[in-house]
Amino acid sequence: MYPSRFRYEAPRSLSEALDLLKLYGEDAKILAGGQSLTPMIKLRFTSFEVLIDINNIPGLDYHRADSDGTLHFGALCRHSDLEHSELLHRQQPTMAAAAPLIADPIVRNRGTLVGSLCHADPQGDWASVMLALNGEIIAASAEGERVIPVSELVVGPFQNALRQGEIAVEARVPAPKGTVSGDYLKLERRVGDFATVGVAVALESSGSTVSRAGIALTGVGPQNIKATAAEQALVGNSLNSGTIDQAARLAAEAAQPKTDHRGSAEYKRHVVQTFVSRALANRQPARAA
Amino acid sequence: MAQALDEIKIGGLGSSRKRVEDDRFLRGKGNYTDDFKLTGMLHMEILRSPVAHARIKSVDTTKAWQIPGVHMVLTGEMAAQHNLAWMPTLSYDTQAVLATDKVRFQGQEIACVVADDPYIAKDGCEAIEVEYEPLPAIVNPEQALASDAPLIRDDKVGQNDNVCYRWEVGDREGTERAFAQADKISTLRLHYPRSHPSPIECCGSIADYNPATTKLTVYMTTQAPHIIRSAVALVAELPEHMIRIISPDIGGGFGNKVPVYPGYVASILCSILLGRPVKWIEDKTGNLTSTGFARDMYIEGQLALRNDGKILATRFHADTDNGAFFSDAQPSKFKIGLFHSAFGCYDIPYGYQTAQGTYTNKAPGGVAYRCSFRITEAMFFQERMIRAAAFDLGMDQAEFRRMNLVKDDDFPHRTPFGFLLDSGQYEKCLDVALDAIGYQDFLREKEEARSRGRRLGIGISTMSEPLGAGNSREYDIIGIKMFDAAELRVHPSGKAILKIGAKTQGQGHETTFAQIVTHELGIPAPDIVVEHGDTDNTPYGMGTYASRSTPTAGAATAMVSRKIRAKARKLAAHLLEVSEEDVEWELGRFYVRGAHDRGVTIQDCAMAAYSNMPDGLEPGLENNAYYDPPNLTWPFAAYIVTVEVDPETGVWDVLRMVAVDDCGVRINPMIVEGQIMGGMTEAYAMANMQFITFDADGNCVGSNYMDYLLPTAWETPGFELHEVTTASPHHPIGAKGVGECAAVGGPAAFVNAVMDAIDDTGVRNIDMPLLPDRVWEAITYKRDVSGAPPVKTD
Amino acid sequence: MEERRVNVTVNGEPKVADVEPRMLLAHFLREVLGLTGTHIGCDTTNCGACTVNFDGKPIKSCTMFAVQADGHEVETVEGISRASELHAVQEGFKEEHGLQCGFCTSGMMMTAKALLEENPNPTEEDVRWALSGNLCRCTGYQNIVKSVLWAAEKMRSEAAVRR
């Protein structure tokens, strides 16, 4: 409960933050919402010399949509902003379903979407949502910006693909084509628990035909898993009990669960199948394109 | 005409008066141990073992001593120089304060660092280098009893195995005969998982040894300050009159804050060595990994049954996992608490029980987590067994209970294990609960839902638990008899101060104990202040746990009030100028027999005690009473839960929960209901999510709130409460105690409901907590599911 | 050791202090400012006993460093009543027996107050949802929920009178 010593920097602009990051190199750690990092600091599970707090950088707390439907989420957009977002309720049902299931209501007031993605906890919910939506991260550095697909951001448990000197400044969800629907289902034993299993489903369809499918899994592997085969089984087809069953089966096959105190591997795999099937059958439509 | 006082209006018995203690808590002005700041105070942190079982090869504290701001690094070796490396436990065993030879569980105390602030103390802990030689870890009794098991307690002379006690009670031969005559024998085996009371506030102490006066004052989170003072006097070899224990506001206890923990002792030793106050506040990981666990019991037993449903006998055996040190907090004479209270509410002629305890590489404790010493395990096994037997007989579970419950006119009823149940209306409680839930309707609904693939279930739990230890014939802790005391002073103006040996941790003693005085004397409750928790200023008492405050200290309060009334009667006679025999009492007032208008109030008498006493009468109006209850108290409860189970995921939701409690006369109904709802929530938690387990290496799973799951407002179901009242025949105001009934009897209602929802599978048992994966496994494979450690991992 | 200057408004009063960056906000409130009504219950941001309102929103003060509060407003339990007059939430907890040991109560009330400022007319479900980041071991929550609904009603009727 009593952290080790560190230096603290609170830059007022992104360029100042990048300068500091360059100055301190490997010894620095970025603090955004801090709802995962701070507990690790308190338990002395992580150590570093300089904490660079980006909470004072103005203009990073946005989330907005382009006219084509591309969604942008600033590095300081909090989970609670998303939980109460009219925009998401209108346009992005998978995210709207996931937001209230992140941690607990108080943690959601501080924690951020971008920070969660970078934290790369294999039991994190947002990474599955973003995998299902083909989301991306924008990484800024002194050299400029680059786009990292979320599928490439997470390279292992608690390991991300950001390079030294880079700060993740935005998450992005590409514009959908066609009608959007989706859901996020999470088996948690109580509010604030990590997912025993989480399933994100995001569909785009044209008429009754699925034009794009995103299915990703939480808590059933060393990192969040994109169930590619299950996605492909849906594309070009309409949703019916046959295609739903097949996708659910393929998603279960893609899972790599381990037996632990949250349940057996077999059980978790079974829940993946059940949840994919339920999410596809009961998915929520977007209210507007 | 003099107007009679309205007892409810003045805050007497039966009044739901608002709580006195709320005012400070609502403003953030409570005084919990961590809130005290003494001049010159230093802070202590504890270094804990990361491994479960290992020989300590070396402890190097050099670097810790070098950190600026560090005042003391205390190791086991140093403690040993003061004869404090080990301390006695409440179960006549020994426990390491700071490890010297081996570590015996993960989280065990190795060393302490005292520094200017806790951050620096933690830095100091991190700088200590300990070299371990790992030993195999034992995490359950089966491993402990294996012939090749390593000896955990190699420190104890004559200890050649990992058994810490053996116990038996009952009539073995009679029971065997009854079993021989049975039409049917029903069997059940289960594990009651390890749990932790886990109050939100962790344990802590501020030891303040004054070298000038040689007085030791300890502010600490203890439910039993007086017994702690005696224990500290014995352990630290200090004169008892120079020890003052102050138990300030406590952020929940639930049994966690009864034992003496190494942290308390270490803070005292450090304060003595440094001559300055030393504060130790435990973190949650320390609390969950090292302080008093509860349960962790394997029970197997049988009921001998007649085909018509009559229970002829019971026999059962318990294996307890006691951790590295046998430190169960329980009356000394009983090695497995009051576990033999099982099946008490049923009229069963014969019973025989055996038990065996084992040392394992897990934290010690065995505390009475919201219960009277192992009765939670007893009642859980009883009610799970009763349901299994009804099922085996093909009988309705409610009718099976009704047939076997002790009848109203059978009291007092002696159980085969020797308890004397003195009162109750068991069948009535059951009926009230069945009515409230709509039993027959639900059975139809369940059947109808089943035909459509939905799984509904209903679970019942009925039990009478022994509360209020003790009587001094049978109950003592480290030799000190389990009575309790109260002291009452009535000031000249008629305002009063009551001092009790019990200690609230949220139960509201400051509110309810005044109500007892009000009931006895008619002094309005707001005119009475209740003091507790300071050994210098309160009479001796055994503390608050086992729902014993009202049965013991509450009774003492009534008795001391009666002594005050007796003296006031003399004063009244004097004031009224009549003989004492001609004085009549009504609430708050004496009057002359036959002349109701000629009277004096209790306040008049109080003033007279200081200003106008008759010749020969000692001045003042104060007294004390030590109360030794003639028997335990025997509340009864009927709990019914309905659930729906999702067969695809094993997730179950509570549909309704009905509680009927007969806890005798209710002093403050609002507070009683609060206790029942709190207990019921813990029952739900234990059935659903709350447990501590261990992996094969002895690593604790459940060492923080990320893994030790407590339910939030979102999951916790709503509760429907009902009441039946049968006064205790021996308690002066007829109360029986209530704090733990729901936590004791509740778990079985939840589990029985889930078992009922899967009653077509042939599954007899799923161990708590009924995690979704366990329920799913039971449904899918139609097999019992064990939850015993080590936890399965890939 | 390197200390940082922190300017923070606590319960409406400006406070200035030099603190180590590693000091948690909860410890700053308790140890530096002496506001011990904010409690610390767990190590892992689960229990919510340390909940305070940070720029009007409940946060867990054990999961923020004091230096992060620089330039911000913090409200603790000590700041919600005026003189002898309790806030409606405090009154509600007393009326409906929403507390027992009192340890979680400050955090519960801070969360409840923020909820009612945002949603003056919550349902039981809204209240249970909003409080699901605060753990209580004593009450079983039912009376806490009733307390918050009691406060909501009182605040609504007071607002109606003002109109």
Image (cartoon, coloured by chain):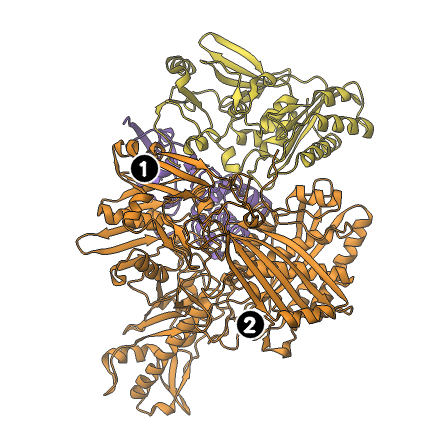
Name the residue at 36% across, 40% down: C11
User: Type of residue at label 1?
Assistant: Ala
Q: Colour of chain B?
A: orange
Q: Residues within 10 Å of mark 1 (few under 14, many from 20)?
A: many
Q: Amino acid at mark 2?
A: Phe
Q: Which residue is mark 1?
A: B121
* Disc ID at residue B419: 2
Please report whichever mark, 2 or 1, sits nearer to the chain's N-terminal start.
Answer: 1
Residue B471 visible in rendering? yes
Horizontal side, residue B352 vs residue B443: left or right: left
Name the tint of chain A in the rendering: yellow
Task: State the hue of chain C.
Answer: purple
The subunit letter for the residue under badge 1 reads B
Which label lies toward us, 2 or 1? 2
**Residue positioned most to the top:** A143
Q: Which mark is residue B601?
A: none
- List x then y, in percent, for residue B316: 63, 62
